[in-house]
Amino acid sequence: LIEYYLVQVMLTMNRLVHQILRGRNGCRSAVIFRGVNTGANGIIQGSIAMGGVGISVGDFAQVKRIFSADEVKEYGKLIGDDNPIHRAQDCYSSNEELSPRVIVHGMFSASLFSSIFGTLIPGSVYRSQSFNFHSPIYTNEYIIGRVDVTKVKDLRKGLLVTCETTVYKKVDIEGETTKEDSDCVLGLEKCVKGTAQVWLPGLRP
């Protein structure tokens, strides 16, 4: 019983915080919530609060990640994908010289989207996901997975959230990927782009 009331108090406090953060016109102010550590997938940052309380159009969340060759190898074993482009010894660059870089499975990189919702809003259910792959992601490249809320539909027993889903990698002036702490970042290269719908049971707008 005590735990129940503690949860209710936390939810109430979250609602109050979101009301404060919204301006008079009802728009979200440019506030970034503290990061949530997801373990292997790094720290999630953004304006989507834990539990999804007050989620609205314009909210976002993102996570920074670097995939290792060992992780790609283990993922390939798990799903039974023996494509040589995901193995270091068989991965060649365009000039046919042996390259230490390995292409990360597209679905592996796209899994960042569901991990964001699963971590921030336990109990959330993925309803659909579509995406296009624009540029390959290699191991040891610094990437950012991001979801941007574009629509929130209020249903009887929860919310159906639609969002844009994107994976970027940082590139420098020569188009090469950079490390997280690099000072020569020119911009972000789009690697994966799509749309997702996520069911958030029990939440109200």
Image (tube, grey):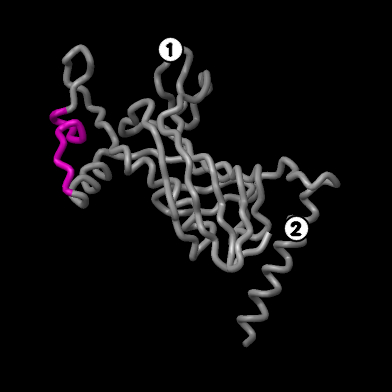
Q: Dividing the image into 4 quarters, which one contains the C terminus?
A: bottom right
Badge 2: residue crowd in 10 Å (few <14, some 14–19, many ≥20)? some
Residue 2: quarter of image: bottom right
Residue 99: quarter of image: top left
Task: Check if residue 173 falls in the magenta segment.
Answer: no
| Amino acid under disc 2 | Val
Judging depth in this view, the residue of 152 and 79 nearest the camera is 152
Of circles 1 and 2, the one toward us is 2
Judging depth in this view, the residue of 155 and 91 nearest the camera is 155
Q: Position of residue 107 (x, y in %)?
A: 32, 42
Highlighted magenta segment, given as a residue range = 80-90
Task: Please give the label number shown on residue 78.
Answer: none
Q: Position of residue 177 (x, y in %)?
A: 41, 23
| 103 to the left or right of 6 | left
Q: Position of residue 194 (x, y in %)?
A: 45, 37
Residue 10's place in the image compared with 81, above or below, is below
Q: Position of residue 10 (x, y in %)?
A: 68, 69
Q: CA distance from mark 1 to mark 2?
A: 43 Å
| Amino acid under disc 1 | Glu
> Which residue position holds label 1?
174
| 56 to the left or right of 103 | right
Q: Residue at x 65, y 45 (%)?
A: 57
Q: Residue at x 38, y 38 (%)?
A: 66
Q: Secondary structure at mark 1?
A: loop
Q: Mark 1 touching mark 2, by CB under 8 A?
A: no
Judging depth in this view, the residue of 178 and 80 nearest the camera is 80
> Which residue position holds label 2?
17
Q: Residue at x 51, y 19 (%)?
A: 184
Task: Check if residue 84 falls in the magenta segment.
Answer: yes
